[in-house]
Image (cartoon, rainbow, N blue to C red):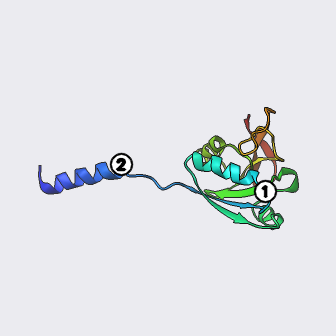
Amino acid sequence: MSRRMIWALGAMLWFAHAPVAAQEVTVWHSPTCGCCHLWAKHIEAAGFSVKLNETDNLDPVKKAYGVRPALASCHTARVGGYTIEGHVPAQDVRRLLSEKPDAVGLTAPGMPASAPGMDIGAEPYDVLLIRKDGTTEIFARH
C-alpha cells in the first residue's frame, strides 16, 4: 500500500470519528424567568449548544417567528430554521430536525407542569406542530 493510500485511509477514519459540532439553539427569554434557564439546560444535556438572549418584550420575537398568542409560552427558540416555543422536550426537537416537515416549528403552549424545565407535576400535555398556514396538529403526547 502506498503512503498516499495510507494517508487517505487515515484521513477517512479520522473524519468518520471526528466530533460533530453541536447544533445551536438560540433562545429569547425574559430576564426574570427561571424556568427558561432550566429548559436550556435540558436542551444542552441533549447535546445542543444554547445561546441565551434576554429581552423585556418577547412579543416581536414571537410574531417574527410565527407564534400566535394562543400558542405562546415563556420563551421562544430557533434551531435549524424552525421555531421552538416553550418547554418542548429535546427528543421532539431532534425528531423535528430529522423529519424536516414543511412547518414553522413546535410549541408546548402555556407552561405544562410536567414539561422539561418545569418538572413540577405529572400532568399530560401535547406538543403541537405549527404548520405554515397557522394550523396545528399533535406532534407528540407526553
| Tag 1: amino acid | Cys
Categorize mark 1 by other alpha carbons within 10 Å: few (<14), some (14-19), many (20+).
few
Query: Going by the image, does 19 lie left or right of 11?
Result: right
Q: Residue at x 42, y 52 (%)?
A: 19
Q: In the rendered image of this protein, does residue 9 appear above or below residue 26? A: above
Contact check, label 2 and label 1, Cβ < 8 Å: no
Residue 110 is left or right of residue 23, and the answer is right
Residue occupied by mark 1: 33
16 to the left or right of 55: left
Q: Is residue 32 visible?
A: yes
127 is higher (above) or lower (below) than 83: above
Instruction: Report how far apart the C-alphas of labels 2 and 1 lie in the structure.
Output: 41 Å
Q: Amino acid at mark 2?
A: Ala
> Which residue is depicted at the point 18% across and 52% down?
6
Q: Quadrant of the C terminus?
A: top right
| Residue at the farthest left position | 1
At horizontal 63% and vertical 41% (from top left) the residue drawn is: 91
Whole-percent x and y of residue 135?
A: 81, 49
**Residue position marked by numbered label 2 in the rendering:** 16
